[in-house]
Amino acid sequence: MISFRQRYRQELLALSFLWPSLVILVALLVYPLAEVIRLSFYDSNLMTETWAGLANYRRLSGDPLFWQAFWQTVLFTFFSVAFHLVIGLALALLLNMRINSLFQSLARGMLIVPWLLAPTVAGMIWVLMLAPFGVINGMLNGLGLIDAGTTISWLGDPSTALGSVTAMNVWRAFPFFMVMLLAGLQAVPRELYEAAEIDGASLARQFWHITLPQLRGVITTIVLLDSIWTFRAFDPVFVMTGGGPAHASEVLPTVIYFDGFQKLDFGYASAQAVVMFVVLFVVSAFYMRRSMSTAG
Amino acid sequence: MKSYLKSPSARLLALTVATAFVLPALAQAQTEVRWAQWKGTEVGQEFMAELEAAFEAAHPDIDLVAVDSPFTGFHDRALVLHQAGQLPDVLMIQVDWVAEFADLGMIEPLDERIAAEPPEFFANIPETFHTTWRGKQYYLPLESGAVALYYNTDLFEAAGIDGPPATWDEFAETARQLTKPEEMQFAVTGTLATEPPTNMTYEIYPLLLQAGATIIDPETNRAAFNSPEGVAAIEWYVERINKDNISVPGVLSNGEREKRANFASGNIGMMFEGPWGIAIQKQLNPELNYKIAPLPTGVTDGTMVRGSLNTITSQSENKDAAWTFLNWISGPEGIEMWSKGTGGFPARTDVSSQDWFKEQELFQAFVTQMARPNAQSPFLVMPNAVQMNKIMTTEIQNIVQGTKTAQQGLDDAAAQWNEIFAAAN
């Protein structure tokens, strides 16, 4: 009869190597997550914790501010990711053309700059640019798109606040898409295009039938990552508008922060965080399955 | 007899051993008081070191350690430290956090300690800072200040205006004269940005008081600003902003930062600001010619008083030593040193009445303003001032945008405030 140790020798060995990372994973990921889920069933204000059952979830289902923030987060994420993809892909295609290599590397270096900025710094720069007497209004004035003397208060008008924050976010993160897609493009075998040319395929058809399918893996991955990053982005909104005016640019992360740290309503904030987590989890699972089935 | 200590290495060893024993003993003789605050970055580490040295010279048995961290996020960090059981002995707070931190059990009442002091110790602290929470005094002020009216003397002169407006009507007229959008010149920077919600301090709350409204009814402990007087104040404000267009555009996204920068740029006629603004203007534009006057009067006077306060935390292990520090820093000696060194408005009348301070011309409007009726700090009796200010900000934004009438907006704000009051009881 073989002993336990002999039988599970391999597993024990693996575990002995793995345990430090498992401990870190549990401490930094599993424990906080479990704690947030637990808190979401309590009425908690740091002083007291009383069992509330599903009360927090019932409350948020009827909370107009939560749903407003939810849909605004969806809009913010959708438009950010869509524009990241369109602009990133367009620039990647341009940079992938056979052009002067010095210009190519120079342009690549310049275009990556927004991605290097911290979201708060980028937000502050845009706050200045979008000010009533800032650069953006000045440019629009100069181009004759708005009358001289009129000023648009981009961040102070409820109808433009969320769009302005989205524009900043698009500007800040498109280089990530550009770089990833450029790497993807460079991995597409030239022979495919040559064969297509011989068969007389137009550029548009080449793009549709060769480029896009070849980039599918990269696109799936970066769209997934970007959706997650944008959906939970707190700093752009907090720095630029604080969620205002009158909640017009409120997103889930800011609502959760205000409920937790300003109202000290940690139970309710946790319930909202759990809903947000579920959404992100479902999106991730969907994309993961897709990307795995494509890979397989 | 041959001494072993003659060899240099033996001497060094002996010295090291002796030091190792003596140093901790010396350190133990001193009690450490840790003071968490956000002023170090603002007033400079050099002054903070001088302050520590001055206190320790007077109290050699205490080792004062000033722990500095930036104001942004200070409130949240204090909460986290409390949860972790790591609060320092003395914690600096804003007027907005007193009730919240007291209810969370983070800070200690000081009534017994104050009662043991000579009566002039507390009597010289401005009346506003005698405001208690649930009948207890939880804090002592380090610096204070009321909101008053800064005005650009060059622009006033150019427009042929004699002096600062003393009444609402004069203010409206002066503001119209100063507003010249074609020259990018405006009377004020209307500040209704969502974050930080402290913006309410400067325009909205003083106006409510000046109109004769009460912000919180002291009898019922409920919101009372949605009275006809309060509605009149907000309607008057909205008319100035939307009809006379006296403000720099972007009222709903302008905050304190924009207000100060705009005034410093020299093309804004007036600014509602506290005494802390003097040092800020000096930094932004030392060349700017301006003076400060008390706020215009409506039916009556009114202003908001804010301040930086010190508290003793419930997690402190050296509460007696912490009190010794609080007693010193909020006493005449500490307040005088603080005001002289930082340019802060002294939070003691026996210091603000001293000759050296009377010579500081710019500060005198604040002395006048503090002595006028309704120099209030309602934040001290709000169960959660941060949240309540935010509610008010959002509703005033709705009113300025025209999505709600002044009455509707104030009623909605009052209803939300009253929920918070009810929950606090």
Image (cartoon, coloured by chain):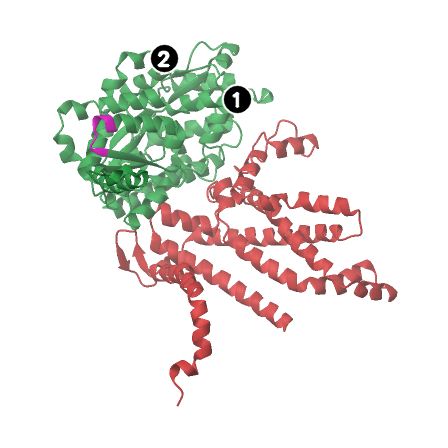
Chain colours: A red, B green
* Residue B361, numbered circle: 2
Name which of mark 2 and mark 1 comes first in the sequence: 1
Q: Chain of mark 2?
A: B
Circle 1 Cα neighbour tier, 10 Å, few/some/many (<14 / 14–19 / ≥20):
few
**Which residue is more in the foreground, A33 or A159?**
A33
- Is B57 a magenta residue? yes
**Which residue is more in the foreground, A294 or B388?**
A294
Q: Amino acid at mark 1?
A: Ser
* Left or right of B282 in this view: A142: right
Q: Chain of mark 1?
A: B
x and y percent of residue A289 in the render? 57, 70
Question: Separation of disc 2 and disc 1 at Cα?
Answer: 22 Å
User: Is B334 above or below relative to A39?
Assistant: above
**Which residue is more in the foreground, A122 or A156?**
A122
Image quadrant where residue A102 sits: top right
Residue B203 visible: no
Q: Amino acid at mark 2?
A: Glu
Q: Which residue is mark 1?
A: B265
User: Is A84 above or below relative to B136?
Assistant: below
x and y percent of residue B226 in the render? 33, 35
x and y percent of residue B223 in the render? 29, 38
* Element under disc 1: loop
Residue at 53 percent across and 40 percent down: it is A121
Asked whether the residues under marks 2 and 1 belong to the same chain, the reply is yes
- Which residues lie in the magenta part? B56-62
* Left or right of B381 in this view: B320: left
Quadrant in which the N terminus of chain B is drawn:
top left
